[in-house]
Image: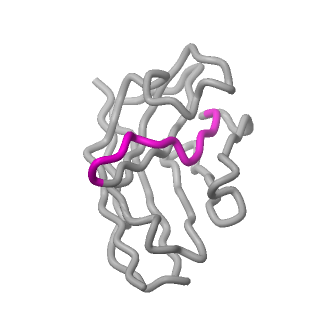
Amino acid sequence: QVQLVESGGGSVQAGGSLRLSCRASGYTGGDNYWGWFRQAPGKEREGVATMYTAGGSILIPDSVKDRFTISQDIPKHTVYLQMNSLKPEDTALYFCALGGGSPLWARLHPTAYNFWGQGTQVTVSS
């Protein structure tokens, strides 16, 4: 069974940076993709980045693409989300996810994913 564990969340002031990590245990590779999502109280879960587990096929929405970067360490089955120039509206619970079988255009939607981490809180103060 695949398990995902996120780390790296915390509290920062506006303009600061954070790097989230997510490591998959029980994952042995395959035709899959990573996703990073966030969910603020009272809002829907929003996809902020996706990347193919073998590299490439990166998609980041326009709302964060100038500030967020996704990368990975393939041998370690670990994916990262680098977040720069953070804003108070970036405050949310951030999740990583692992999925398979969906085309690239669909991979920012939660239904494209089978496995989820427990989330890590990011709080940005003004």
Query: Is residue 39 shown in magenta?
Result: no
The image shows residue 21 at horizontal and vertical percentages of 44, 57
| Region rendered in magenta | 41-52
Q: Quarter of the image holding residue 103? A: top right
Give the residue furthest to the front.
42
> Is 110 positioned to the left or the right of 85 in the image?
left
Q: In this figure, what is the number of numbered marks?
A: 0
Along the line of sight, the residue nearer the viewer: 77 or 32: 32
Name the residue: 53% across, 74% down: 86
User: Which quadrant of the rendered structure holds the C terminus?
Assistant: bottom left
Residue 51: image x %, image y %?
A: 63, 39
Colour mapping used in the image: one colour
Residue 64: percent from left, percent from top: 63, 58
Whether 49 is among the magenta residues is yes
Left or right, residue 113 beside residue 25: right
The quarter of the rendered structure image containing the N terminus is top left
Identity of the residue drawn at 61% across and 24% down: 106
For this view, does 124 lie left or right of residue 42?
A: right
Q: Of 9 and 91, which appears nearest the observer?
A: 91
Residue 34 position in % (x across, y down): 53, 37
Determine the residue positioned at 52% across, 26% down: 29
The residue that appears at 42% across and 36% down in the rendered structure is: 97
Furthest-top residue in this view = 101
